[in-house]
């Protein structure tokens, strides 16, 4: 799904920066490439449910704090 198809608020970059993590740090923590983190942050694609859960766990936030529907 592309960013134009998904009306999501995406706060991944904000929460990653708040924790002082680089994209590479977060990628390693959740087992994906830095490019994957970059494409999620830049809304190139919407992460899978599993990836969203892993990101939330790594950042110690809820999935809803990272992503929510943009009404």
Image: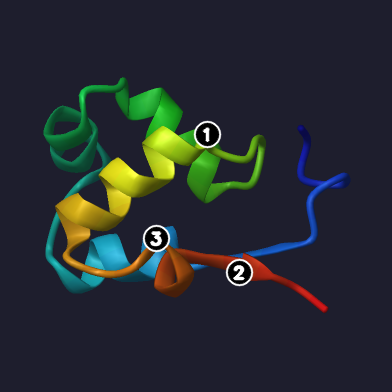
| Residue 24 vertical position relative to residue 33 in the rendered view, above or below | below
* Tags 2 and 3 touching, CB below 8 Å: no
Q: Nearer the viewer, mark 1 or mark 3?
A: 1
Q: Nearer the viewer, mark 2 or mark 3?
A: 2
Disc 2 and disc 1: Cα gap in Å?
Answer: 14 Å
Q: Residues within 10 Å of mark 1 (few under 14, many from 20)?
A: few
* Tags 2 and 1 touching, CB below 8 Å: no
Nearer to us in this view, 48 or 42: 48
Q: Is residue 30 left or right of residue 45?
A: left
Quadrant of residue 24 within the rendered picture: top left
* Tags 1 and 3 touching, CB below 8 Å: no
Q: Residue at left 53%, top 35%?
A: 39
Image quarter (top left, top right, bottom left or bottom right) of the N terminus: top right
Q: Residue at left 39%, top 36%?
A: 51
Q: Secondary structure at mark 1?
A: loop
Q: Residue at left 42%, top 74%?
A: 65
Q: Position of residue 6 (x, y in %)?
A: 79, 50
Q: Which residue is mark 1?
A: 48
Q: Secondary structure at mark 3?
A: helix
Please report whichever mark, 2 or 1, sits nearer to the chain's N-terminal start.
Answer: 1
Q: Position of residue 14 (x, y in %)?
A: 37, 70
Q: Position of residue 19 (x, y in %)?
A: 14, 67
**In the image as oriented, which residue stretches furthest toward the right?**
5
Disc 1 and disc 3: Cα gap in Å?
Answer: 17 Å
Q: Which residue is mark 2?
A: 68
Quadrant of residue 32 within the rendered picture: top left
The numbered mark at residue 13 is 3
Q: Secondary structure at mark 2?
A: strand
């Amino acid at each position: 799904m592309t960013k134009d198809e998904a009306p999501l608020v995406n706060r991944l970059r904000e929460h990653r920066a708040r924790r002082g993590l680089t994209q590479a740090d977060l990628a390693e923590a959740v087992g994906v490439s830095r490019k994957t983190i970059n494409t999620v942050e830049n809304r190139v694609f919407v992460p899978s449910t599993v990836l969203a859960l892993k990101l939330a766990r790594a950042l110690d936030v809820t999935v809803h704090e990272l992503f929510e529907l943009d009404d």
